[in-house]
Amino acid sequence: MAYQKRFFEKNQLIHVVSRAVTDIFKIKADCYQFIFQFYAANLGKKGFNVRAKDVIKAGQALLNREKISSKFIIKEHPPIVDLLDFSLPINHFHFYLLLNIENMLPFFMKKLNDGFAKYFNLTYNRKDAYLVLVTKV
């Protein structure tokens, strides 16, 4: 079967589900890391020399709609998506997103999945925790 490339329009509502081969949210710190990773991928990338405990505090602050220090994020572009709703079950995640930049969803999800997989692999000393992206519109 041939692969069909999808086009994602600006202001399109998108439901994203991504599953992993293992439980990826083992403790609360994993959830906070993921929330921070989402924020960083949406604007650019994580700042330099940001410690793990700072990332956890930043993830907690983001959940409480508080501002975080500008040293935590290197802004490279305007927000790619607006997060409308999310859920973090133990082995996958769900998002409802509104796309702000046309056709940037694959770029955003690659940054998010790669960044969190790297964190997860380093934290839990794993080499096979791949995240698989399944997107529904």
Image: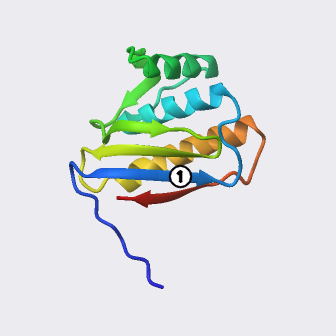
Q: Position of residue 71 (x, y in %)?
A: 44, 18
Total numbered labels: 1
Amino acid at pointer 1? Ser
Tag 1 secondary structure: strand
Tell me which residue sits at (49%, 29%) in the image: 36
Q: Is residue 54 left or right of residue 110?
A: right
Tell me which residue sits at (64%, 54%) in the image: 130
Query: Is residue 50 in view?
Result: no
Q: Residues within 10 Å of mark 1 (few under 14, many from 20)?
A: some
Q: Position of residue 51 (x, y in %)?
A: 60, 20
In the image as oriented, which residue stretches furthest toward the bottom? 1
Q: Is residue 125 left or right of residue 55?
A: right
Tell me which residue sits at (43%, 77%) in the image: 3
Q: Position of residue 86 (x, y in %)?
A: 45, 38
Q: Position of residue 49 (x, y in %)?
A: 56, 22
Q: Does 11 sit above or below residue 40?
A: below
Tell me which residue sits at (78%, 41%) in the image: 125
Q: Which residue is mark 1?
A: 18
Query: Is residue 64 in view?
Result: yes
Q: Is residue 12 left or right of residue 134?
A: left
Viewer-side residue, 38 vs 73: 38
Q: Which quarter of the image is occupied by the C terminus?
A: bottom left
